[in-house]
Image (spheres, rainbow, N blue to C red):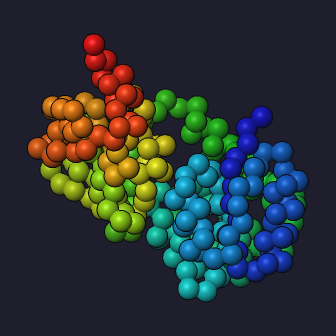
Amino acid sequence: MTKLNCIIVDDDLMARKSLERLCLKSDNLNLVATCENGEQALDTLQEGDIDLVFLDMEMPELSGIDLLDACPVMPQVVVISGEEKYAYDAFQYQVADYLKKPINYIRFKAAVEKVLATYTIQHSIEPEDAIFIKVDGRYVRIQFSDIFYIENVGDYVQFHLTKKALIVYSTLKSLADRLPKDKFLKIHRSYIVNLDKIVDIEENTLVVKDKVIPISRANKPQLMKKLNFL
């Protein structure tokens, strides 16, 4: 049976508890975390491996819409709110469904089944040759073959492409989970490289696109194995 890793994001304690009970009642959900604000949700999403977000629209400081804007790679989202006026804004972000508080279990179950159906379709298709990332409020398709390496830059990561570089709000860990393992490898805490783009390898460094990149001692054996060194 497929189980979706989900999180709840709502500043209202009673609403969180109500949703927790609904999630625990479902055989198709694995509740990973409950977040009382958008900042906590961002931190949780940065850890990766989340399939579904139950997202409240009305939160102080970082609202549901703000969170949708801030997260470059968002899993499926079911919006929850006591106000129907937020439904239109939410669906502009192609959310999976909208639930009005107080949430009825039958309606909740239908939303989960809808998300599950989409998840099943997405994971039954052969892996794409590209990744979508959010840049300046829009999703940009990047071909895997166009990526030379990805560099950690504080709270952001920078994609070094054939003709340009793009900075997005994400982590190397979450991106490593989305990139094909046979083509990309995290060789250092600050770098993921496209194995096909490696030009030269020395003792503790390699060269990609004229950039000398360090290789961590822990990751070097895996790198050598993937490159089929004798």
Q: Residue at x 40, y 66 (%)?
A: 155
Q: Is residue 144 left or right of residue 2?
A: left
Q: Residue at x 36, y 22 (%)?
A: 225
Can residue 52 be seen at all in this image of the molecule?
A: yes
Q: Is residue 149 left or right of residue 88?
A: left
Residue 13 screen position, x and y as percent:
79, 78
Compared with 197, 224 (above or below) is above
Compared with 22, 1 (above or below) is above
Q: Nearer the viewer, residue 202 or 103?
A: 202
Q: Is residue 143 left or right of residue 139?
A: left
Residue 121 screen position, x and y as percent:
60, 37
Quadrant including the N terminus: top right
The count of marks equals: 0
Outermost residue to the left: 210
Compared with 228, 90 (above or below) is below
Residue 60, picture quadrant: bottom right
Can residue 141 be seen at all in this image of the molecule?
A: no
Residue 92 screen position, x and y as percent:
52, 68
Q: Residue at x 58, y 31 (%)?
A: 124
Residue 116, picture quadrant: top right
Residue 12, picture quadrant: bottom right
Quadrant including the C terminus: top left
